Image: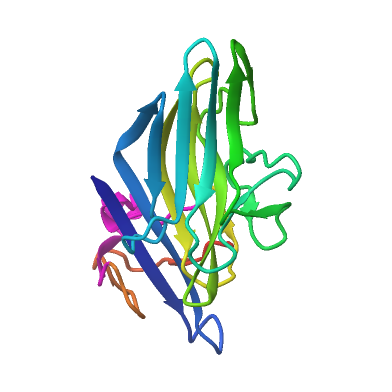
Amino acid sequence: MKKQITLLVLLAGFFSAAPLKSQIVYTDVNPDSVKTGTSVLNIDLDNDNTTDFRVTGTDVPGSYGFLVVTANAVGTTNAVLVDNTTTNNVLALNLNDPIESSSTAWDVMNTNDANMTAYALTNFIGTWLNAADKYMGLRFISNSNTYYGWARFTVSGSAIQYTLKDYAYNSTPNAQILAGAMIIGINEQPNTKAGLIENMYPVPASDRLHFNIAKECRQGVLKIVDIYG
């Protein structure tokens, strides 16, 4: 079961003469998707029922095995973030690493595979060995627009076993996203539990988000920031 959260915040008036929009579409894979051995995992980053990226595991015990990423030919520049276009090793990004057009380097994935891990007999190699809660930088094209996102994995260092936990993308074309960036749902807002915000609506919002402030709050500052701070 996938839990998807979308929130759009519009800031205008007091803050700027022009609206500032920022939207992250976050999908929680619940329960986590765990794959072992020879397997296929499809990732539909924008949840439009079209696979954008595919992780393929091949395991021949005592001989060889590998874990690779590929992408469907949607548009012409579907890609995963790799360390260089010669070795095609997928980078295991850390939390808050930027994912954007200037990230080094993007490798087009329409016809190529990008390596996560591999082994021959018992010799394991790869950038994702023993990776715990690391992020794969993703880029895809939809309706001629380019979007950036991430997917969070944990990968074993002694077997072809991996876990997909969640993923997200910034639905603002060409906008940066930080690895692990997500939108917190209304029921998860810490200030809501403290009684400052009684209600926010609509969730998800299409162009404006309304706040109801508790009557007991006589003074205070409500600060709203976008994903860039």
Residue at image coords 54%, 37%:
68
Q: Residue 131: x, y in percent? A: 56, 28
Task: Inspect the magenta stretch and tell me whether residue 146 lies in it.
Answer: no
In front of the other: 143 or 164: 143
Task: Inspect the magenta stretch and tell me whether residue 186 lies in it.
Answer: yes
Residue 18 in the figure: left or right of residue 98: left
Height in image: 201 above or below 97?
A: below
Height in image: 124 above or below 200?
A: above
Q: Residue 22: x, y in percent? A: 48, 70
Residue at the extreme bottom: 17
Height in image: 228 above or below 161?
A: below
- In the picture, residue 102 is in which quadrant? bottom right
**What segment is highlighted magenta in the picture?**
181-203
In front of the other: 101 or 224: 101
What color scheme is it? Answer: rainbow
- The quarter in which the N terminus is drawn is top left
- The quarter in which the C terminus is drawn is bottom right
Residue 157 in the figure: left or right of residue 47: right
Q: Residue 127: x, y in percent? A: 65, 31
In front of the other: 107 or 25: 107
Residue 203 shows up from this direction: yes
Residue at image coords 45%, 46%:
54
Q: Residue 64: x, y in percent? A: 55, 19
Residue at image coords 54%, 14%:
63
Residue 180 shows up from this direction: no
The total of numbered circles placed on residues is 0
